[in-house]
Image: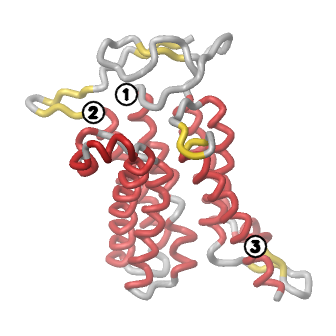
Amino acid sequence: MIELPFDPALALGPLTLTWHAVFGLLGVLAGAALGIRLVLARISFDDAWAVAIGGVLGGLVGSRLFFVVEHLAAFLAYPERALAVGDGGESIVGGIVGGLAGGLLVMRARRLPVAWVVDRGVVGLPLGMAVGRLGDIVNGEHWATACDGLPWCVRYTHPASLGQREYVHPAVAYELLLDLAIVGALLAFVRLPHVRATVSRSRDGGVSARDGFEPFLFLGLYGAGRLALSAVRLDPLWIAGLSQAQLVSALFVGIAVAGITRLRRGASG
């Protein structure tokens, strides 16, 4: 059993921040740095930087938009709060959608090799998510189901914490581990051509690497993992008894299956 005594506020002289904000910023920097590093073999630093900025801005917009939609009734009563981002409130699945969309728009505007760039740039996304999840753990955000008999059950003891006072599953920590596992899987496909080449087979039985595979791999792995973790998450229900994250994650899995299937058929057609 683990007790977490963290104060969610971080005082730096006259400035007060939340650990969520600190690790969120570090996550953006880490994810952007890795994505930029992996695409410099074929595009300039300026183009890589522009794609990263587009992804970050798109992620911020998507994250807030999905959160507002998820809690639409509350925001309809006080619509001005929709833009009060300083009050908190975000959706990780919205950040994924917005980040991918923002990056793709910049790639197309700059006429970059979209499939090749997104294959490598997408690796930074789960890394940034993993680092950002450290702030969620410290702050006690995202409530989870009760936990008993496991050495890693956690509860929050600081009076100002948003976390639960009874022992629960560290659901956000589980997701952090999921994110890191996805980073490893994506890097394997980027760095090991013989692994990546098994994605598709040509008519003569040989194998050929296909650009554009890694985004579908990311969506499939994250979607499936997030659906599994919903068993220990206490997310608000949205439609048909399901949370927004469950619905979007199921959509991610569907997109991944369709995309990978299309790539395989394209290689053999």
Q: Front-most of 105 and 190?
A: 105
Residue at the right extreme of this rendering: 205
Q: Front-most of 103 and 28?
A: 103
The residue at the point 84 percent across, 78 percent down is: 201
Q: Which of marks 3 and 1 is in front?
A: 1
The residue at the point 32 percent across, 47 percent down is: 76
Q: Front-most of 184 and 232?
A: 232
The residue at the point 42 percent across, 21 percent down is: 163
- State whether residue 226 is above or below residue 212: above
Q: Contact, CB < 8 Å: mark 3 with mark 2?
A: no
Residue 105 at x, y percent in the picture? 41, 77
Q: Contact, CB < 8 Å: mark 3 with mark 1?
A: no
User: What residue does disc 2 label?
Assistant: 18
What is the distance, in whole Å, between disc 3 and disc 2 at their CAs? Answer: 44 Å
Quadrant in which the C terminus appears = bottom right
Q: Tag on residue 99? A: none
Residue 261 in the figure: left or right of residue 191: right
Q: Contact, CB < 8 Å: mark 2 with mark 1?
A: yes
Q: Which of marks 3 and 1 is nearer the N terminus?
A: 1
Say few, some or many: other residues with alpha carbon within 10 Å of mark 3 (under 14 / 14 to 19 / 20 or more).
some
Q: Nearer the viewer, mark 3 or mark 2?
A: 2
User: What residue does disc 1 label?
Assistant: 139
Residue 134 at x, y percent in the picture? 43, 35
